[in-house]
Every structure is written in C-alpha cells, then in structure tokens.
Amino acid sequence: MLLTTIFFDLDDTLYPASSGLWPAIKQRINLYMHERLGVSWEEIPILRQSLFETYGTTLRGLEANFSLDRADYLAYVHDLPLTDYIGPDAELRAALETLPERKFIFTNSDRAHAQRVLAVLQVESFFTGIVDTDALAPHCKPQPRAFETALRLAGECEPRRCVLIDDLPHTTRAARDYGFLSILYGRDGPSPDADATLTRWRDLPALLDGRRP
C-alpha cells in the first residue's frame, strides 16, 4: 500500500521528553486548576488522572465537569518560554526533508502552541497542516472519531495510506486498530502497542522505506 500522509504527535514526540517542556505544561495545568477552578492541591493529582482516563485529556474532563473558558485555559497552560526548553533539531529537520509524504501535526493541544513549537524547532515549513484540539472537538486522541476527523481534514479516505507517530502507547494502539501504520516514538525494541518503534529521527526514512511497496 502506498503511503501518502504522516501524522506526527507534538508534545514529547517532535521534541524529546527529556526537554522538561511537557512537565512544565503539566505544572501550568495544575496551577490553572488550583487558581482558576479552586481545586485543592491535594485533589489535583487524583482528579487529573481520573479525567484523563475518562475523557482522554484533562481539558475534555474539565469542560465536562467545570465552567471554564477554553481559550483562557489553553493560553494559560502554554504560557511558557519555549526556548528555555527546546531548540532547533537538525536530525529531525534532515529526516523530514527526505520524506515524500505529506506531513501533518495531530495533537490534543491547540494550534497556537503547535505553531510556536514548530517555529522554535525550525521545521514549520515541512508541515501541510495542523489537526488540533479545536478541530477534533468534542473528541480527542485516541478516540476513533479523532482519527476520522484527522483523515477528513487531511483529505485522505484510506487509513492504510497513513502513518501515525506518537509517544503514547494507547494512542498508537488505537491508531493501529483504526488502520494506520502506527509508530511508537521513544520506545526501543518491539511493542505490542504499535507496528514499529522509533527512538532516533534519522532512522525514520529507512523504517518507512521498508513499509513502502
């Protein structure tokens, strides 16, 4: 099957988990819940875990259970100096340059955050578009309707022509079940939750070469 489209997750995938950016965003989420919604510090860890497991993202769970301004939440939790955490990635850029398929960001975050990250990494020119939390609403990865929306927005009708690269096993597992070629990023060795694993961007072109006709 000819591959036509690659969907890339954003946080902890396009930039390394070791950067510390995602933990900083999670701290901002906790602060938002405490300052804006009045949730006690003691309640936050248990509540966040419950919301994530039930709704797929903390935001979806908060929207279902609290009165909040979605735009305010997204601006608040991403209000961080990105260059303190991440910077240009020559290996990522070189890999993207060699891939003939169309490339999209597919994220449970918002477009503004994705655009800022791509600009700091200096790879924004390689991506055809961004499928973000607003485009997916009221769904989110790893729900099947999220994959359906991503395909529609990319103008692709055949999941088997698509690749998803993500750092979360439950997302790559769901993508594989939906029909995507799924690649679990940040995991070395075979995984029961994905078709393949990847730890170095320079290995991606060869990995995909082996999947092309």
Image: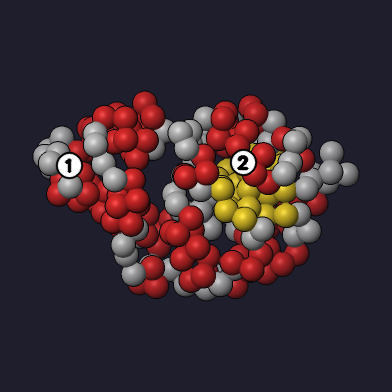
Give the x, y percent position of residue 34.
15, 45
Residue in the foreground of this view, choosing between 63 and 9: 63
Colouring style = secondary structure
Q: Quadrant of residue 69?
A: top left
188 vs 158, left or right, is left
81 vs 104, left or right, is left
Instruction: Identify the residue at horizontal 75%, vertical 59% (top origin).
Output: 99
133 vs 104, left or right, is left
Looking at the image, the residue that sits furthest to the right is 213
Dot 2 crowding, Cα within 10 Å, few <14, some 14–19, many 20+: many
Instruction: Identify the residue at horizontal 15%, vertical 49% (top origin).
Output: 35
Give the x, y percent position of residue 62.
29, 36
Query: What is the tally of numbered marks visible in this picture?
Result: 2
Q: Quadrant of residue 157?
A: top right
Residue in the foreground of this view, choosing between 210 and 24: 24
Q: CA distance from mark 2 to mark 1?
A: 31 Å
Instruction: Identify the residue at horizontal 47%, vertical 44% (top origin).
Output: 133
**Residue 187 in view:** no
Q: Secondary structure at mark 2?
A: helix
| Residue indicated by mark 1 | 37
| In the rendered image, the vertical position of residue 187 relative to residue 173, given as above or below | below
| Residue indicated by mark 2 | 150
**Residue 150 in view:** yes
Q: Quadrant of residue 19?
A: bottom left
Q: Amino acid at mark 2?
A: Ala
Give the x, y percent position of residue 82.
38, 68
Q: Secondary structure at mark 1?
A: loop
Q: Amino acid at mark 1?
A: Leu
Dot 1 crowding, Cα within 10 Å, few <14, some 14–19, many 20+: few
